[in-house]
Image (cartoon, rainbow, N blue to C red):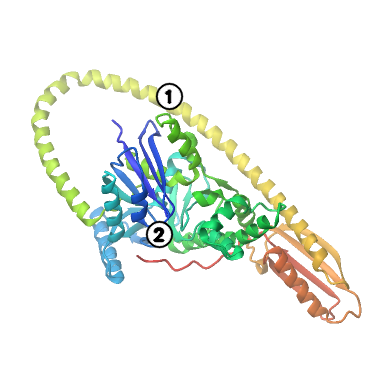
Amino acid sequence: MARTVTGVDIGKRTAKFLRGFWKDNTFHATAFAVSHHAEGSVAAAWKASELSFKPTDARIGLTGRDVNIRYTRVPRVPDWQLRKLMRFEVEEIGGQSGSEVASDFNVLPNLPEVEGEDVVLLAMARESLLEEHLQGLAAVGGKVDAFTPLAIALYNAWLRFGAIEDQTVLIANIGHENLDVILVRGPDLLFARNLSGGSSLFDAAIAERFGVSARKAEELKKEFATLEPGGTFKDGNQEKASRAAQAAAGQLLSLLQSTVMFCKSQVNLTGLRVDKVLLCGGGAALKGLPRYLQNAMNVPVELFDPFTVVDTTSLSPEEGELLDQHALESVAVLGLATLASDPDGYSIEILPRKVARARDFAQGTVFLIAAAVLVVGFLGYEAWRTHSSLQKVRQQASAADAQLKRADAIDRKTRDLSEESAKLAERARDLAELAGSGEQVARVLHTLATELPRDFWITQLTSETRFDDALGVPRGSECPIVHVEGRAQEGTESTSVLFENLVRGLNEKLGAPAISQKLSNTGDKFTLDLTTLALRETAAPKEERP
């Protein structure tokens, strides 16, 4: 019988509980609950939880400052030796931080770029954080299965419910205070990371612009803020909220870009290039956020909704409606529940030391008893099995033949769908590039109309998709670049100052684009090359330790 488990995601504002089991290649949801709390602490979240079911076998998600995900490249060694190496690593980090930590590790799928070595993902969490969760779980009658970083839960949600192709995909779960990000290539995990910074970035920016509390700013964000490019604002409040949200969106963009850069350096994937971005979490619901990131990163950006292939028929009508309302922010809790129920999932299972010791003792005792029972039962079973083995082998061969035929049919259909998806993806990229080029030219023309000095005029303006090292657009990542040539009226005074003002105005109105500029020695001719579509890399922030 399939194992029924509970995924638990305790966030800064909401706690999500999803109960169910993995069977027949899908997850069957049997119960769902959401609770809201105001204090933003683990203890407050558990205290505010109102559940109609007991969260037994609970897989609890971890994120934030008390969780640390590290990567270590090691020679390919036996499992016992790898466990010893990781134990030394954890003891060293625990000694440096001055606090007890619990940990678990797993090896990333083999990477062609890393020859002769394994890349080990090591996850650590403070024992004090785990103890808070254990106390809260016990108070609602639950029992822990294990703790897992939300980034790993996000990967399992993608692995089981995503449309997997031969692409490099960045998936981001935008919480209120934290951002969980993974990079996958096809079905393989390349990188997982948790960062400080989520939808609270937007709340803080709006609160500062309006001079209100964070709670009021959150209401204004939901009511007014939009990041849809080229849209018109219905009133001054919407314009103020949207302008503030754009600044916060730039911070979020930098976090995503830094994750790609950090992956390149940590896992040594220097040629890594993202083909697609998927968003989930409560922060992903901000109007226009996918379009904003798509324009900035020059790759398709979509919302990730895995619940379209989850069996929710066992939920009550009230639970089903509640899940529909919180589907976007429940992707990680679905990954937790699926991971705990699916024995083939990519797992990180962190346990507090006292729980791990008790479990090891119980499992060892049960194993000895079970071994004795099996020895006695095997003697009688062997005689019966020998008599019926021939008939069973024939039945198994017939069943295997039928399974092979079904698998061949599914394989052919999958290959056809994959080829069609690749063609559609290529066409979508071409259309996105064409749209971005046209919008950029329109914005440049509009800005020049307001910023061009009176005695200056434009002699030529072209747009071409190409690379330009001076603009930070490397070969292989070409994007539309606008080339402007112009002149100043002979005898115009202070042409260099007017030209600097023109460049400054372009920066302000176009949102700090990449600009290459040149003014002739006589000051009567000038050229500009600029783009607002380049993917500008930012330095990766230092990794926070627990």
* Quadrant the N terminus occupies: top left
At label 1, counting other C-alpha atoms closer than 10 Å, the crowd grade (few under 14, some 14-19, many 20 or more) is few
Instruction: Identify the secondary structure beneath mark 2.
Output: loop
Which is more N-terminal, label 2 or label 1? 2
**Identity, as a three-letter code, of the amino acid under mark 1:** Lys
Residue under the point 87% across and 81% down: 493
Q: Secondary structure at mark 1?
A: helix
Q: What's under tag 2, amino acid-wise? A: Gly
* Frontmost residue, 381 versus 363: 363
- Between disc 1 and disc 2, the foreground one is 2
The image quadrant of residue 143 is: top left
Asked if one can make out residue 339 in the rendered structure from this viewpoint, the answer is no
Residue 541, percent across and down? Answer: 47, 67
Q: CA distance from mark 1 to mark 2?
A: 48 Å
Q: Residue at x 36, y 36 (%)?
A: 20
Q: Position of residue 316 (x, y in %)?
A: 41, 31
Tell me if residue 139 comes above or below residue 197 in the rendering: above
Instruction: Name the disc covering residue 520, or none.
Output: none
Mark 2 Cα shell of 10 Å, populated few (<14), some (14-19), many (≥20) = many
Q: Which residue is mark 2?
A: 64
Q: Is residue 517 left or right of residue 284?
A: right
Where's the C terminus, which quadrant? bottom left
Q: Position of residue 251 (x, y in %)?
A: 56, 63
**Residue holding disc 1:** 405
Contact (CB < 8 A) between labels 1 and 2? no
Q: Residue at x 81, y 65 (%)?
A: 450
Task: Tell which of 355 and 52 is nearer to you.
Answer: 52
Q: Nearer the viewer, residue 51 or 295?
A: 51
**With 320 as the anchor, is 510 left or right in this view?**
right
- Inspect this view and state whether residue 123 appears: yes
Residue that protrudes farthest toward the right in the picture: 490
**Residue 30 image offset from top left, x and y in percent:** 37, 33
